Image (spheres, helix red, strand yellow):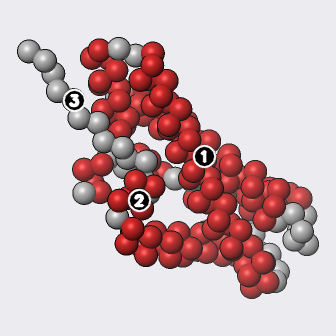
Amino acid sequence: MKHKTRLYNVFFPLWMLMFFPVTWLLVVPVNWVFDSLVLLVAVAAMRLRKKKELYVKSIFRVWVFGFLADLAGVGVMALVYGAASLFLKGETQAAFLEAFMVDPWQHPAALLATALAVIASACVIYVLNRRFTFQKQALPDATKRRLSLVLAAATAPYFFFVPLNWLI
Protein backbone atom coordinates (compact mmCIF):
# COMPACT_ATOMS: atom_id res chain seq x y z
CA MET A 1 0.00 0.00 0.00
CA LYS A 2 1.39 3.36 -1.00
CA HIS A 3 1.68 6.03 1.70
CA LYS A 4 0.32 9.44 0.65
CA THR A 5 2.07 12.42 2.12
CA ARG A 6 0.93 15.98 1.61
CA LEU A 7 3.46 18.70 2.10
CA TYR A 8 2.49 22.27 2.79
CA ASN A 9 4.69 25.31 2.46
CA VAL A 10 4.76 27.09 5.82
CA PHE A 11 7.32 29.79 5.25
CA PHE A 12 5.18 32.08 7.34
CA PRO A 13 4.50 34.94 6.92
CA LEU A 14 5.48 34.80 3.24
CA TRP A 15 3.05 32.11 2.20
CA MET A 16 0.21 33.80 4.08
CA LEU A 17 1.13 37.17 2.63
CA MET A 18 1.06 35.77 -0.91
CA PHE A 19 -2.15 33.76 -0.60
CA PHE A 20 -3.97 36.04 1.82
CA PRO A 21 -2.87 39.60 0.91
CA VAL A 22 -5.12 41.05 3.60
CA THR A 23 -2.65 39.49 6.07
CA TRP A 24 -0.31 42.40 5.28
CA LEU A 25 -2.78 44.63 7.10
CA LEU A 26 -2.06 42.65 10.26
CA VAL A 27 1.61 41.64 9.86
CA VAL A 28 2.99 45.10 9.06
CA PRO A 29 1.57 47.00 12.05
CA VAL A 30 2.07 44.08 14.45
CA ASN A 31 5.75 43.90 13.51
CA TRP A 32 6.07 47.67 13.86
CA VAL A 33 4.48 47.63 17.32
CA PHE A 34 6.52 44.64 18.49
CA ASP A 35 9.80 46.08 17.20
CA SER A 36 8.89 49.41 18.81
CA LEU A 37 8.20 47.79 22.17
CA VAL A 38 11.44 45.82 22.11
CA LEU A 39 13.46 48.89 21.15
CA LEU A 40 11.80 51.13 23.74
CA VAL A 41 12.12 48.56 26.54
CA ALA A 42 15.78 47.95 25.67
CA VAL A 43 16.53 51.68 25.59
CA ALA A 44 14.75 52.18 28.92
CA ALA A 45 16.46 49.18 30.53
CA MET A 46 19.86 50.51 29.44
CA ARG A 47 18.88 53.93 30.82
CA LEU A 48 19.90 55.72 27.66
CA ARG A 49 19.27 59.41 27.22
CA LYS A 50 17.37 60.92 24.30
CA LYS A 51 15.04 57.93 24.07
CA LYS A 52 12.63 59.63 21.69
CA GLU A 53 15.38 60.76 19.33
CA LEU A 54 16.96 57.30 19.32
CA TYR A 55 13.58 55.70 18.66
CA VAL A 56 12.66 58.08 15.83
CA LYS A 57 16.03 57.66 14.12
CA SER A 58 16.09 53.87 14.49
CA ILE A 59 12.65 52.28 14.32
CA PHE A 60 12.17 52.28 10.55
CA ARG A 61 15.46 50.50 9.93
CA VAL A 62 14.86 48.08 12.80
CA TRP A 63 11.50 47.21 11.28
CA VAL A 64 12.74 46.84 7.68
CA PHE A 65 15.76 44.82 8.75
CA GLY A 66 13.44 42.50 10.67
CA PHE A 67 11.60 41.70 7.44
CA LEU A 68 14.90 41.22 5.58
CA ALA A 69 16.09 38.88 8.30
CA ASP A 70 12.88 36.87 8.00
CA LEU A 71 13.66 36.49 4.29
CA ALA A 72 17.14 35.22 5.19
CA GLY A 73 15.54 32.62 7.44
CA VAL A 74 13.16 31.63 4.66
CA GLY A 75 16.19 31.30 2.38
CA VAL A 76 17.82 28.90 4.84
CA MET A 77 14.57 26.93 5.01
CA ALA A 78 14.40 26.79 1.21
CA LEU A 79 17.98 25.48 1.07
CA VAL A 80 17.19 22.81 3.67
CA TYR A 81 14.05 21.83 1.79
CA GLY A 82 15.99 21.57 -1.47
CA ALA A 83 18.79 19.56 0.11
CA ALA A 84 16.32 17.19 1.77
CA SER A 85 14.47 16.76 -1.51
CA LEU A 86 17.72 15.88 -3.28
CA PHE A 87 19.49 13.75 -0.72
CA LEU A 88 16.78 12.03 1.31
CA LYS A 89 14.63 9.30 -0.20
CA GLY A 90 11.48 7.37 0.56
CA GLU A 91 9.91 7.40 3.99
CA THR A 92 12.84 9.31 5.51
CA GLN A 93 12.33 12.14 3.06
CA ALA A 94 8.56 12.13 3.52
CA ALA A 95 8.78 12.14 7.33
CA PHE A 96 11.36 14.92 7.44
CA LEU A 97 9.68 17.17 4.85
CA GLU A 98 6.22 16.75 6.35
CA ALA A 99 7.53 17.67 9.80
CA PHE A 100 9.65 20.50 8.39
CA MET A 101 6.73 21.99 6.47
CA VAL A 102 3.86 21.30 8.87
CA ASP A 103 5.15 20.85 12.42
CA PRO A 104 8.90 20.90 13.11
CA TRP A 105 8.28 19.50 16.60
CA GLN A 106 7.45 16.12 15.04
CA HIS A 107 11.00 15.35 13.86
CA PRO A 108 14.32 16.18 15.56
CA ALA A 109 16.08 17.02 12.28
CA ALA A 110 13.21 19.30 11.23
CA LEU A 111 13.38 21.05 14.59
CA LEU A 112 17.15 21.49 14.21
CA ALA A 113 16.77 22.84 10.66
CA THR A 114 14.09 25.27 11.81
CA ALA A 115 16.33 26.41 14.68
CA LEU A 116 19.12 26.99 12.15
CA ALA A 117 16.81 29.26 10.12
CA VAL A 118 15.80 31.22 13.24
CA ILE A 119 19.44 31.60 14.31
CA ALA A 120 20.41 32.76 10.80
CA SER A 121 17.65 35.38 10.93
CA ALA A 122 18.78 36.53 14.38
CA CYS A 123 22.35 36.90 13.10
CA VAL A 124 21.13 39.00 10.16
CA ILE A 125 19.11 41.19 12.54
CA TYR A 126 22.18 41.68 14.73
CA VAL A 127 24.54 42.50 11.86
CA LEU A 128 22.17 44.86 10.03
CA ASN A 129 21.21 46.76 13.16
CA ARG A 130 24.78 46.92 14.45
CA ARG A 131 26.18 47.96 11.09
CA PHE A 132 23.46 50.28 9.79
CA THR A 133 20.76 51.18 12.32
CA PHE A 134 22.98 52.35 15.15
CA GLN A 135 26.12 53.21 13.16
CA LYS A 136 25.59 56.99 13.24
CA GLN A 137 23.97 57.11 16.67
CA ALA A 138 25.90 58.92 19.37
CA LEU A 139 26.23 55.78 21.49
CA PRO A 140 29.21 53.85 22.80
CA ASP A 141 30.08 50.77 20.73
CA ALA A 142 29.20 48.46 23.61
CA THR A 143 25.70 49.97 23.78
CA LYS A 144 25.24 49.57 20.03
CA ARG A 145 26.24 45.91 20.33
CA ARG A 146 23.88 45.33 23.28
CA LEU A 147 20.94 47.01 21.54
CA SER A 148 21.58 44.97 18.39
CA LEU A 149 21.84 41.77 20.43
CA VAL A 150 18.61 42.46 22.31
CA LEU A 151 16.79 43.15 19.04
CA ALA A 152 18.22 40.00 17.47
CA ALA A 153 17.26 37.80 20.40
CA ALA A 154 13.79 39.27 20.93
CA THR A 155 12.65 39.74 17.33
CA ALA A 156 14.00 36.59 15.65
CA PRO A 157 11.25 34.78 13.70
CA TYR A 158 10.23 32.28 16.34
CA PHE A 159 6.97 31.85 14.43
CA PHE A 160 8.89 29.38 12.21
CA PHE A 161 8.38 26.92 15.07
CA VAL A 162 4.59 27.33 15.08
CA PRO A 163 2.79 24.27 13.66
CA LEU A 164 0.65 24.94 10.61
CA ASN A 165 -2.53 23.67 12.26
CA TRP A 166 -2.25 26.45 14.86
CA LEU A 167 -2.48 29.02 12.06
CA ILE A 168 -5.39 27.67 10.05
Please, is residue 65 above or below residue 117 in the view? Answer: below
- Circles 3 and 1, Cβ within 8 Å, touching? The answer is no
Mark toward the start of the polypeptide (1 vs 2): 2
Q: Nearer the viewer, residue 55 or 51?
A: 55
- The residue labelled by disc 1 is 72
* Quadrant into which the N terminus falls: top left
Q: Secondary structure at mark 2?
A: helix
Position of residue 26 in the picture relative to residue 115 (left or right) = left
Residue hosting label 3 = 5
Disc 3 and disc 1: Cα gap in Å? 28 Å
Percent from the top left, x then y, of residue 124?
A: 68, 49
Q: Give the number of the disc on residue 18.
A: 2
- Alpha-carbon neighbours of circle 2 within 10 Å: few (<14), some, or many (≥20)? few
What amino acid type should be assigned to the residue bearing mark 1?
Ala
Image point 75% across, 69% down: which residue? 46
Characterize the local packing of mark 3: few (<14), some (14-19) or many (20 or more) Cα atoms within 10 angstroms. few
Q: Earlier in the sequence, mark 3 or mark 2?
A: 3
Which part of the image, by quadrant, shows the C terminus?
bottom left
Name the one closer to the observer, 51 or 68.
68
Q: Earlier in the sequence, mark 3 or mark 1?
A: 3
* Dot in front, 1 or 2: 2
Check the image and name the residue furthest to the left: 1
Q: Secondary structure at mark 3?
A: loop
Residue 13 quadrant: bottom left
Disc 1 crowd rating (10 Å Cα; few below 14, some 14-19, many 20+) is many
Q: Give the vertical position of 39 relative to 105 (above or below).
A: below
